Image (cartoon, rainbow, N blue to C red):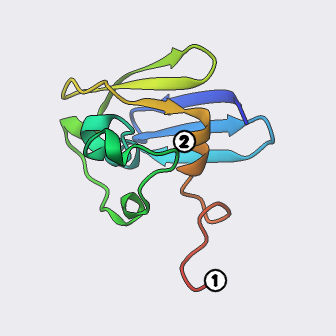
Amino acid sequence: MKPTNILASRSKREVTITWDDGHVSVYPFSLLRAACPCASCRGGHENMGPDPDPLVFSLPITISPASSLKDLKAVGSYAISIVWEDGHDDGLYTWAYLRALCPCEQCRPPIGS
C-alpha cells in the first residue's frame, strides 16, 4: 500500500492521503500528533509496534502548537516525517502505520456495527 497523493491543509488542519487502491484517508492534525509513532510519545521502545494505540481515536481534537503542522517531509519511499510547531519531529509515519491509522468509517467502523 503506497500513497499516490499527499496533501496537507493548514486551514482545514488535516492531511489527506490518496492510496494506490483508490482509498482516501483524512487525518486531523491532532490525531496524527496523538498517534506520533516515536519512542518518546509511545512511552519507550518496549511500546513500539506496527499499529497505533486504539486510544488515540477517542481523544478530543485539540488546537495547540503541539498539533499544528509546521512541515511535512518525505522519508525515502516508505514514510513521512512531520515537524510540529512546538518543534517535535521524531516520528516516522510509515505507509503501513498511516493506513492502520485511517479514521474513516470503512477502516474503523463505529463500535457495535
Label 2 element class: helix
For the point 51% across and 50% down, the residue is 51
For the point 67% across and 28% down, the residue is 5
Rendered location of residue 105, percent (x, y): 62, 65
- The residue positioned farthest toward the front in the image shown: 46
Type of the residue with mark 1: Ser
Q: Is 61 on the left-hand or right-hand side of 66?
A: right
Label 1 element class: loop
Specify the quadrant that holds the N terminus: top right
Q: Quadrant of residue 81?
A: top left
110 or 49, which lies in front?
Answer: 49
Type of the residue with mark 2: Tyr
Q: Identify the disc placed on residue 24.
A: none
Rendered location of residue 89, percent (x, y): 30, 24
Specify the quadrant that holds the C terminus: bottom right
Number of residues whose C-alpha sits closer than 10 Å to that of mark 1, classed few (under 14), some (14–19) or many (20 or more): few
- The residue positioned farthest toward the top in the image shown: 76
Task: Identify whether 32 is placed above or below 10.
Answer: below
Real-space Cα separation, disc 1 to disc 2, in angstroms? 24 Å
For the point 43% across and 42% down, the residue is 12
Which residue is tagged 1?
113
Q: Quadrant of residue 42?
A: top left
Rendered location of residue 60, percent (x, y): 30, 62
Contact between marks 1 and 2 (CB within 8 A): the answer is no
Q: Which mark is nearer the camera, 1 or 2?
A: 2
Q: Is 104 on the left-hand or right-hand side of 33?
A: right
Which residue is tagged 2?
97
Answer with mark 1 or mark 2, whichever residue precedes in sequence: 2
Task: Identify whether 101 is placed above or below 19.
Answer: below
1 or 26, which lies in front?
Answer: 1
